[in-house]
Structure formats: structure tokens, C-alpha cells
Image (cartoon, helix red, strand yellow):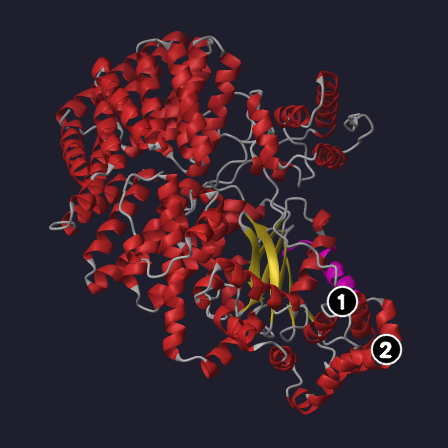
Amino acid sequence: MTTPLPRPGTVRTAAEFVALLRSVKTQSGLSYRALERKARRVGDYLPVSTVASALSRVSLPSEEMVVALVRACGGDLATVAEWVEARRALALRERSAPVADPPGAAPDRPNDTTGGDHEDRNGAKGRQLVPCLLPPDLPLFVGRDGEVTEACRQLDQGKPGPVTLLVTGPAGVGKTAFAVRTGHLLASRFPDGQLYVDLRGFGDEPAEPFMVLGAFLRVLGVRGGAVPPELTSRIHLYRTLLAQRQMLIVLDNAADALQVSDLLPNGPRCAAIVTSRTTLADLGGRRIPLRVLDSAAGLALLRTMLGPDRTAAESDSARSIVETCGGLPLAVWVAGARLAARPHWPLAKVARALTDEQRKLDELAVGHIAVRASLELTYQGMASTTRHALQMLALLPGPNFDAWALAALLDVGLSHAEKVLDDLVEVHLVEIGSVGATGFRYQLHDLVGLLGRERAEQEVSRQDRTAALTRLLGASLHLADLAADTLSVDFQGISQTDLASWRLSPTDTDQLLADPLTWFNDERQFLIDVVEQALDRTQVAPAAGLATALTTLFQVGSHFDDWERLQGRALKAALHIGDKRSATKLHRCLGELTTILDRYPEALEHFEQALLLAEGQGPAYRASATAGLAYVHRLLGQYSSAVCHFGQAAELARSAGNVNCLVYATNGIGVIDLEQGRVEAAMERFTDCLQVSRLAGYRPGEAQALRCLGQSHRALGAYPAAADCFRQAASISEDLGDRLGATHATCWLGDVLVRQGEHGEGRRLLARSLWSYREFGNLWGEAATLYALAEAQLVAGRPVSARRRAEAAVRLWRQIGSRTWLAVGLDTLARAHTLAGDLEAATRARDAATAARTALDSAGR
């Protein structure tokens, strides 16, 4: 018998409502991904990331999400109606005036150019996602009650802020655990969220404030393309956003005041916790120094790890362990972890071992030196193969990694690497950080990494260390290139595998890349770190190859900061050593990025440089750059140049056997035909592209051809056929993980649904598309959606709302220089003015449209 779903009749607050909704999801037994698929089958929209975020907040989710989630979890019509009624009652009770958006930031709701009643990208009126970035609270936390109480008192006094709390002490004393525990205790005090970052201040690559600010701004709601490119502008926008919020910022593991000064909040209701191994003497704030644990607290930690019976049975040995470790939490933890992993060991065994190290512990009794002594003890007890693995792991460029990375470093298979990692996890020198798509992801504490690097330098030759890192780079390049090729989002079609010097077995590779997009997302930062490390070691060609292979990940995930920074550095290195092949590919990729960001002059420069460097190289290099150049000319309305370049790209692609680029170029000529009114000629090209893409299994090309066929049917007024094409295109793009492609199809599907008379569903899809385009920072798509919304308002007989949207679309098309669509938008604006009775304004709009078309003709139409 099926257990009935929980009912919301007794909830009194939004937090209780969300908590009960979480229990509905838990009772269903379905994963977020399964819920998304189930909802899609009945026409509901339930994206994984949105649902997960909504269920982690204390504010009401949208009514649309509540309906979709309860229905996907098995709720009948009566249950769904009861949940909707409860949500409406709570919304009425807590409704308050929305806070205005700060200038320059992505708004919490659409700005006035959209008109009407606004909803955010998840459907919640006037609300935004609340960031909760604190790591999970640690269960092993003892002996800090007094300090935690004082920290909470300092941060919760209710006085005008901002307040900065500096938590300092030696390495291994538990500063991170203390900051995380305090943050969780005070979460309700900061209802607008908590930000967290590990600044890696004492690692080889400390976090840069520029990149941290970029990540924080994205979390705070600034769309990818709107994140400022300069440090000063990022600081100003970050402070503007925090000035209106009540947030806690945790800056962990800082090197000095310089690293954190630009990240501190300025809002009067904000607070910051900064942890560091140094005293941060030149940074103002309230201070809590953490000391080593006293005997009682150290014993409590050991008792928590081993159980009261085991420690009571050998109380003298337990006390000896704590005293010999000097009360340093990490040292006690290491000894306790060894015993916990070996329940058959007596405590006296470890106590005697630590006593043997007494002189060393006495001499190295403070800070990280005491930890090193404890780690040395564990290190010496390991097998030689395990010690060598730790030495190799210490060479990794980042603290977070998967087992395949160790396989490459050791030149072994994946299963062997996983077994070695199990041995390291057993003694807690390696931790399981999370569970990724292909298994466990591991973490190496920076102090353990320090020990491993010292031992590697002493016991492993430079030649062997270099060979290990070369294998790591080769494996990274091979996997990234195969994943990118499987996704086929990009039309470049230039394989990097000829640069890969080491590969996993086909079986291991297939296991890792069963879901290439998820693998890409899990490995994104690690692969970036591998590129950076290789560039530091002057392995420019393979590093540039890996940076190029990452284009697909950057494009699908809209990681524009990472894309531009990493490939920009690789391009500079390639040009410095005269590596034309690498520079050609990087220019092509950066041309794609600047096109997406509507920076057309830069895009033209990148594509032209790529062609210049590609002289004398194979047609594959010239084909993709020529196609990209043609695309920018088309966006600018320079049709003669665009047709010429598309034709050249098609011939080059055909000779190179690059089906992706051939389809892209042919499709581009068809779009020009369509924009110039030659619909039948356009449909013939699009149909050819569709057939070639399906024959070759090139699904992005299939989606693109379907979108363009949909536009052709739309131009002929065949709206049902157009809607069918757009639905197929959206489905393919969603399966590929191509959110931008799916948004293109969804936008025009909404447009044709409105034209078919399905106004409510059409406007809903357009509103969703508008938010997606703003998240991507895609101005052209945003303008197209605003234009479609204006048309929808005209159909509904709302000239004022239509005028606002048409004006916003026209402004954007003027900004990016798209003359063709500028004229289209001005035509819509003229119709809106006419319907509103403002004939003078309508005449001005029509005259402007005529001028735009004249300029288009003179530009080489």
C-alpha cells in the first residue's frame, strides 16, 4: 500500500513549508534527476539545480515548482491543490515590498523593460536564491565551547557593522572547523545567505581576489556576461550588492591582509570570519586566537573517535596519546584515526610509538611542525608503495582529485589506483571529499601535501617526477578531448589526442566518460589547474591543447571568466614560443567566446588572427576560423562578406572531412537566405543540414537545423510545424546539456505558441528564456526574447507593455550592432505606438527602421 504524502495543513512559516516539502521529496525515493525526467514527461519544468536550491532555502518556492514537485512525487489532484492553497496563504501572510536592485547587478527580478508582474528565473516573485556555501558542520568538534560562545556574541550583538572576526592560530589547531561551526550556529542571523571560500593562503597557488570576486558575484545573482572584467569594478559591484544584504562571509585560510581586504563586506548588517595561521596584525577586527586543546578536550576528541569503552579500558594510554600530541587537534586526530581504522590494535601500541618520537615532538612542539611529527609517524608505518603514492599525489596542482589522476601519476590502471587510495583513506592521510559522477573524489590536506612534497624531493628523482606530471597532462588531455568530442557542442573539429602522451585503458575510459558532461563538471577546476601547472612547466603545446579541449565545458556551463583567463594565458605562451598551431586554435576558441559575449570587434580580431596564423596549415584549422568569422559578419548584417566566408568554410570543411563545420557553414548561408526573405531556399539548406547531421550522428547540428526549420515555418505562418521543430530541437539540446541551445529553441517555441493562441504557456516559456539569456549574459538572445514578448503583448492588445519590451529590444540590438534585427524591432515598436494612438512616435520608429535597412544595404547586403 502506498504511503500518502505529507499534507501542509499545519505549517505556519515558509521554513516549515520548505521542510515539509523536503520530506515529500525524501518519501518519494526519487533523485533530483529522476524527478526532473518524470516532470518533463507530463509537461512540467523541474530543473535539478533549481529544485535543490529551493529545498535548501527558508523562503517559499514558486507555486509552479510546488505543483510540479508534488505531482512528480506522486501527489494526486487533491494533494496538489492543498499544497498550492497552503503556499498562497503563507505568501499572503509574509508579503512585503521588494528591495530595489543595485545598479550594474543582475536583478532579482526582470527590470522595467519587461513590464508586468515579475517572476524570477525559478518563478518566485521578487525573490532570489539564497547562497548557503558553508561546508557541512563537522561532527568531531570538541573543546571550543567558550570560544564558540564568544564568537557568536561578537557577531550577534545587533550593532551596526560590518563586523570582522579574526580567528588565528597554528596549523592543525582547528580554525576551519571552528569557523564552519560558528557559521552554522549563526545562519539564522544572516537570512540573505553565507559565502565561503578556501583562500589556500599557504598552498602553492593561493586564491586570487579577482577570481574569488567573480565566483561570489555569480552566486549573488550576477549573470556570467555581466561580471566586470576589471578588479576595481568587481570590488565596487560586490560591495554594492552586500550593502543591501545581511550576509556572513567566511574567508578561510588567508595568507595575509592583502588577500582578504577586497573581499570583506561593507554592509552594515554583514559580518566576516577570517581564519589564518598568521596573526593578521595589519588587519582590523575582533580577534579570537585558538590555542591547543587541554587534556580534557583532547581526551573527549579521542573518546568521540574510538568510543568510551575502548578509551576507558586503556585510560592511561589514552591520556599519554593526548599529552604526547601536545593537545594539537590534528595530531590527536591522526593518532585516533589510525586506531579507529584498526579496532584490534591496543591504544598502548600507538602510545609507545608516540613516546619514541618524544624528542622530536618536544623540539617541534608548535604549529605545523607538531603536525608534521604526527604525520611522519603515520607515514613511516605505511608500505613503500603507499608512501610513493602519497609522494606522487603531493605533485598534483590542486587538493581535489579523482582516482584516474593517481593512475596516471603511478602509470597503473584505475582499479589499482583506487586500491592504493583506499589504503591512504584508511590512515586518514587522504579524505573522501565528495561523491562525483564516476565515484569518489578525494582531498589531500595541505599539511599532508607538504610532507609528501618533501619526501618526493628527497626520494624521487627529478626525471621521475617530470615523467609523472607528463603522464597526468596526457591523461587529462585525452579524457577532456574525448568528452568534448562526445558532446560535439563546438564545431571546431580539431582533435587534440595526437598530443596526449598517456592514456587509460579503453575500459577505464568508458567507465569515466559514461556521462561526459557530468564528468566535465566534476573535473572542471582540476583540469584548469593541470593546464596552469603545465604552462608553469613550459609544456605549452599540450597545455594549450587541453585549454582548447575545455572550450566545450566553458561554453555549456557559461564559465566565461575561466574560459577567457585560461585560454588567454595559453595564447600568450604559445605566441611567445612561436607555436602557431596552438595559437590558431586558441584564437578560434576566444573568437567563439567574444561572439557569445557580443564583443564583435574582438571576435573579428581573434578569427582574423587565427586565419593569419593558419596560413600553410591544413584545411581543418582554416575551416573553423573562417566559419566563425562568417558568423560574426552575419550578426553585423554584413551579408556579402558572411556568404563569401561561409562558402569558403564549407569547402575547407568538406576537404578536411569536418562534418560539424560543414553543417555549421551551410546552415549559416541558409540563415542569411531566411533573413533576406528567401524562405524556400533557406528551407532547402536546412533540410540538407538536418539529413547530414543525422547521418553523421552530429546532434548539435541536428538541433540547429531543426531550430532554423522552425524559423522557416514560422516565417510562412505554419505555426504547428514550427512548434514541432522547436520542441525537437529543445529536447536534443537538453539531452546534450547545451542550455544555451535549448534556450534558443524554447524562446521561439514560446513565440509561436503565442501566435497559435496559447498565450499563457507561450509567455511562460518566453519569461523563462529571458532569465536564461540574462544568466548567460547573451544580449542578442535577451533582445530576441524581449521582441517576442512585445509581439505577444500586441496580440493580447496591450500596446504599453509591448512598447516597453520593444524599446528594450531595440536598445540591445543597437548596442550590439545587429542592423537586421534592429529594423525588425523598430517595426514592432512602430506597431505598438500605432496601437497606443501615438502616431508621431510610430512615424519616428518607422523612419528609424528604414534608416537601419538603408545602412544594412550600404554595408554590403
Asked whether, in this view, residue 37 is left or right of residue 83, the answer is left
Residue 262: x and y, percent? 50, 59
Which SS class for mark 1? helix
Residue at 53% across, 70% down: 256
Tell me which numbered mark, 1 or 2, is placed earlier along the sequence.
1
Task: Identify residue for label 1.
Answer: 147
Q: Name above or below for residue 571 compared with residue 636.
A: below
Counting from the top left corner in percent of width and height, residue 847 is at 24, 16
Q: Is residue 744 magenta?
A: no
Amino acid, disc 2 = Glu
Q: Name the residue at 59% across, 76% down.
A: 383
From which residue to which does the magenta span run? Answer: 143-162
Q: Quadrant of residue 432?
A: bottom right
Viewer-closest of 563 and 358: 358
Between 660 and 417, the residue placed more toward the observer is 417
Q: Which residue is mark 2?
A: 314
